[in-house]
Image (cartoon, grey):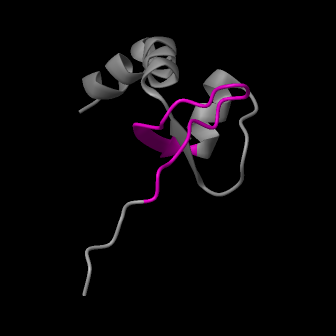
Amino acid sequence: MPPQRKEEKVCQYPGCSKPAERSLPRKKAEGVLGTLEGSGRRVHLCRDHYKKFRKATKKERELERLSW
């Protein structure tokens, strides 16, 4: 049986066609980045848009870690 090939995902940010590197829950990503293409529970983002998401949620993530 031949090995299965992983389907190449593309960034779902409008106008971006770079390969996706990360996937996030759609609600969290749309809350920060606005409306995204595609459907489903998860959204795929390229390195640049994932970095933008991380910068926008930095404070929120720090506060979440403090509550541990």
User: Which part of the image, by quadrant, shows the N terminus?
Assistant: bottom left
Q: Residue at x 26, y 74 (%)?
A: 3
Q: Main secondary structure of the magenta part?
A: loop
- Residue 13, given in percent of the width and then of the height, sits at 65, 30
Rendered position, 67 above or below 43: above
Drawn side of residue 9 relative to residue 34, left or right: left
What number of labels is visible?
Answer: 0
Residue 51 occupies quadrant = top left
State the image quarter where residue 12 is shown: top right
Residue range highlighted in magenta: 7-25
Residue 48 versus residue 43 in the image, above or below: above
Query: Looking at the picture, how far across and down is residue 29, in whole percent?
Result: 59, 33
Q: Residue at x 40, y 37 (%)?
A: 21
For the point 33% across and 17% down, the residue is 62
Quadrant of the rendering where the C terminus is positioned:
top left
As drawn, is 35 to the left or to the right of 49?
A: right
Q: Position of residue 54 (x, y in %)?
A: 43, 19
